[in-house]
């Protein structure tokens, strides 16, 4: 056999011998991918904004749903600066998390997220906790009790560190506030949270959230289990949104201002409908928030003061009173809860205060005057036209000119009788100065003689 033919034979034999190995690798990759798909899913529940009754109920519903639909774990994606529910209701929520049959993990993320106040205490009862770089936790206040036992972050030093201050990822890990977090970079994205859960034993079960698979080149890749995302529905999300201080403050201001405008411009239109909807939503919002009765009373008083001057179409003393009381109400309407200020941001306050000032000093009076003003375009064309007296004019009365009624006045020396024809001699404001067609007075002293 020639050398070239021999080499080709050996190469072909080598290929045939290695084909089963490649087939096994490909089969292993396909089997691993199938195994990843067959892992029990992990449910992710978004917890964003102030924790109110709607959010608390949603978390408890999510836990119950995951227990019944075969989920192997629940991840609460937390970004909250406080809670507007009472400590008793929050304790009930913590008890539900602690008593869950499926593992509960809390991820404070993505970067920039916060877990302050009562929501931060959920980290103490969760099975797995982690943070994204740039996230912060803290200001828990006095720790609650679950099943007559006070919760703890593991040690007195950790409890003290998180009591009033806020901690970043490295500080929280150093105080051992985070559970099962060993990466110096934190958990930047949700997929990394799934990797952190893999292999952890909690509640008598080992979590299998990731499998190692082989790609077509025989290299090991990591494939995560199916993730199911759950958010608030449309109506609960709307009610949750209006229950934030900025939203409630804006909606109340816009709603009352539009209703005042509609009331003093005679008629129920788009402004009245939008104002009513905003007022209802704002009322639902403040019903869920800690409000100051004094501040709410000042808010209502300011709107009454604004309305006094709106009806005359000129900003006067009461507009100043309304603006002053509105500013005071803006800073006093919302009470603090557990050291967390509920007052809207300076940007929101500035926008509302400047907007309400422009509305009642410039915009509203102009619109009201325009709505009730007598048209003046083409009024001078009425001079010289004729009309009919409606009733006697001696010297004041009513005339009909070009199909429209006008206030009229004539010289006392030439009074007009009902249904008598008249001529418009001049115009004084919105009053027509009229005279009879014949025999009108001249210079208010002598009557004009017929020719």
Image (cartoon, rainbow, N blue to C red):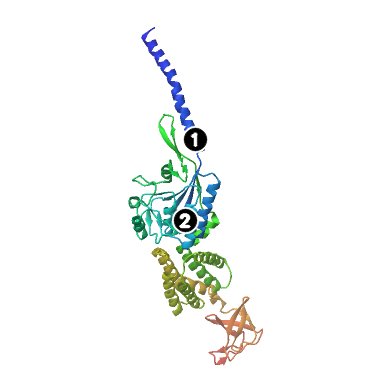
Residue 266 seen anywhere in this rendered image of the structure = yes
Placement of the C terminus among the 4 image quadrants:
bottom right
Q: CA separation, marks 1 and 2? A: 34 Å
Query: Looking at the image, is mark 1 or mark 2 nearer the viewer?
Result: 2
In percent of the image, x 41 and y 70: which residue is there?
Answer: 331
Q: Is residue 203 above or below residue 375?
A: above
Q: Is residue 432 above or below residue 125?
A: below
Q: Earlier in the sequence, mark 1 or mark 2?
A: 1
Question: In terms of secondary structure, where does tag 2 sit?
Answer: helix
Q: Which label sits on residue 94? A: 2
Q: Residues within 10 Å of mark 1 (few under 14, many from 20)?
A: some
Q: Is residue 381 above or below residue 391?
A: above
Q: Which residue is mark 1?
A: 35
Q: Is residue 297 left or right of residue 5?
A: right
Query: Can you give x and y, in whole percent of width and height, for residue 64 in the image?
Result: 54, 51
Residue 85 seen anywhere in this rendered image of the structure = no
Placement of the N terminus among the 4 image quadrants:
top left
Determine the image quadrant of residue 358: bottom left
Query: Could you tell me how many numbered marks the image carries?
Result: 2
Determine the image quadrant of residue 384: bottom right
């Amino acid at each position: 056999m020639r050398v070239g033919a021999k080499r080709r034979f050996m190469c072909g034999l080598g290929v045939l011998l290695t084909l089963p190995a490649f087939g096994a690798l490909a089969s292993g990759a396909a089997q691993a991918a199938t195994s990843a798909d067959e892992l029990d899913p992990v449910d992710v529940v978004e917890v964003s904004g102030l924790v109110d009754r709607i959010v608390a109920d949603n978390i408890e519903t999510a836990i119950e749903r995951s227990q019944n639909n075969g989920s192997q774990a629940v991840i609460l994606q937390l970004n909250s600066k406080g809670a507007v529910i009472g400590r008793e209701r929050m304790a009930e929520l913590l008890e539900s998390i602690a008593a869950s049959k499926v593992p509960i993990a809390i991820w404070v993320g993505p970067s920039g997220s916060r877990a302050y106040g009562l929501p931060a205490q959920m980290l103490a009862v969760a099975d797995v906790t982690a943070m994204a770089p740039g996230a912060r936790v803290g200001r828990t206040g006095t720790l609650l009790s679950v099943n007559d036992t006070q919760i703890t972050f593991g040690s007195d030093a950790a409890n003290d560190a998180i009591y009033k201050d806020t901690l970043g990822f490295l500080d929280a890990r150093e105080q051992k506030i985070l559970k099962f977090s060993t990466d110096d970079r934190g958990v930047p994205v949700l997929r990394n949270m799934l990797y952190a859960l893999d292999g952890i034993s909690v509640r008598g079960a080992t979590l299998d959230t990731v499998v190692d698979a082989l790609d077509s080149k025989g290299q090991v890749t990591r494939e995560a289990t199916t993730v199911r995302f759950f958010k608030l529905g449309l109506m609960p999300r709307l009610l949750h949104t209006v229950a934030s201080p900025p939203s409630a403050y804006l909606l109340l201001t816009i709603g009352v201002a539009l209703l005042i405008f509609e009331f003093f411009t005679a008629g129920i239109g788009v402004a009245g409908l939008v104002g009513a909807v905003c007022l209802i939503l704002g009322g639902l919002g403040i019903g869920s928030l800690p409000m100051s009765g004094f501040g709410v009373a000042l808010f209502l008083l300011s709107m009454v003061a604004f309305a006094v001057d709106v009806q005359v179409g000129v900003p006067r003393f009461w507009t100043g009173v309304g603006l002053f009381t509105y500013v005071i109400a803006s800073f006093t309407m919302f009470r603090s809860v557990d050291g967390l200020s509920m007052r809207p941001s300076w940007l929101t306050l500035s926008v509302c205060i400047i907007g309400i000032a422009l509305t009642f000093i410039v915009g509203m009076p102009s619109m009201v005057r325009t709505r009730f003003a007598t048209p003046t375009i083409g009024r001078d064309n009425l001079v010289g036209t004729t009309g009919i007296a409606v009733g006697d004019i001696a010297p004041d009365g009513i005339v009909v000119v070009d199909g429209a009624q006008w206030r009229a006045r004539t010289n006392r020396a030439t009074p007009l009788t009902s249904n008598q024809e008249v001529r418009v001699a001049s115009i004084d404001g919105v009053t027509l100065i009229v005279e009879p067609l014949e025999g009108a007075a001249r210079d208010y002293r002598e009557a004009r003689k017929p020719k």
